[in-house]
């Protein structure tokens, strides 16, 4: 039986230790870009829910390798996808046979607000990519306002909003996108 030189075993051991440590460091880095960014956003804006922020950004695997600009794009896209989801929910609600005229007008208002928010968020991604961060902020800000305006329309008529969850999520995602984008440039 040939003996494996102990020098070789030693080097192998050193190699494995170094490999393990650099992998652990990389994992930590991936963890921290999202959590650091969300911590920063939550500290800077009382509207931002840290847990919601981390869970949302981590749902996109690209977040792990992203820089701040990448996270701004990812968060704006998440908000856009959410506005799309909210819009399709309204579409379903509008199919109901019996509905007061007032409720219908609220739902139509919200549908329009979601459409506009989708367009603004889509444009904001293009603007971030072009390095026009100030303009991107203006577009994202208009999306931030949409869910509140939708809720207000129901409140004014003293009827219960059927879109509380959609509006909560859209508001959160848009506020997160705004908070990250305002740190660029
Ligand atoms: C923050 O978000 C998490 C995850 O969505 C949720 O469970 C929690 O209730 C939220 N906290 C507040 C104060 O809204």
Image (cartoon, rainbow, N blue to C red):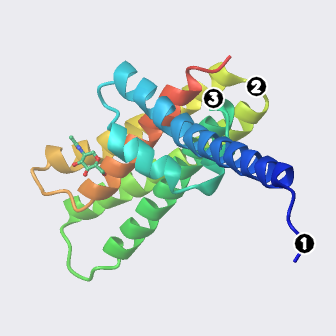
* Side of 10 where 83 appears, left or right: left
Look at the picture and state if 49 lies above or below 165. Answer: above
Q: Report the quarter where the C terminus lies.
A: top right
Look at the picture and state if 60 lies above or below 116. Answer: below
* Side of 110 where 79 appears, left or right: right
Q: Which residue is mark 2?
A: 131
Crowd tier of the residue under label 3, counting other residues whose Cα lies within 10 Å: few below 14, some 14–19, many 20 or above: many
For the residues labelled 1 and 2, say whether their Cβ atoms are less than 8 Å apart. Answer: no
Pinpoint residue 32: horizontal percent, then vertical percent: 52, 36
| Frontmost residue, 59 versus 176 | 59
CA–CA distance between discs 1 and 2?
63 Å
Q: Which residue is mark 3?
A: 136
| Frontmost residue, 29 versus 70 | 29
| Frontmost residue, 159 versus 42 | 42
Task: Residue 171: tell me if it is visible.
Answer: no
For the residues labelled 3 and 1, say whether their Cβ atoms are less than 8 Å apart. Answer: no
CA–CA distance between discs 3 and 1?
67 Å
């Amino acid at each position: 039986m040939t003996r494996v030189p102990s020098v070789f075993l030693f080097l192998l051991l050193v190699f494995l230790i170094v490999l393990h440590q650099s992998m652990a460091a990389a994992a930590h880095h991936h963890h921290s870009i999202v959590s650091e960014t969300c911590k920063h956003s939550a500290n800077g804006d009382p509207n931002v829910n840290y847990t919601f922020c981390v869970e949302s950004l981590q749902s996109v695997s690209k977040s792990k390798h992203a820089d701040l600009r990448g996270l701004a794009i990812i968060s704006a896209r998440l908000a856009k996808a959410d506005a799309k989801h909210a819009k399709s929910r309204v579409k379903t609600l509008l199919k109901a046979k019996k509905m007061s005229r007032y409720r219908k007008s609220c739902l139509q208002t919200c549908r329009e607000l979601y459409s506009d928010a989708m367009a603004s968020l889509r444009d904001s991604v293009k603007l971030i990519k072009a390095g026009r961060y100030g303009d991107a902020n203006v577009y994202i800000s208009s999306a931030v306002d949409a869910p509140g305006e939708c809720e207000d329309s129901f409140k004014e008529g003293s009827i219960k909003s059927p879109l509380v969850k959609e509006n909560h999520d859209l508001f959160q995602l848009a506020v997160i996108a705004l908070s990250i984008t305002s740190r660029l440039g």
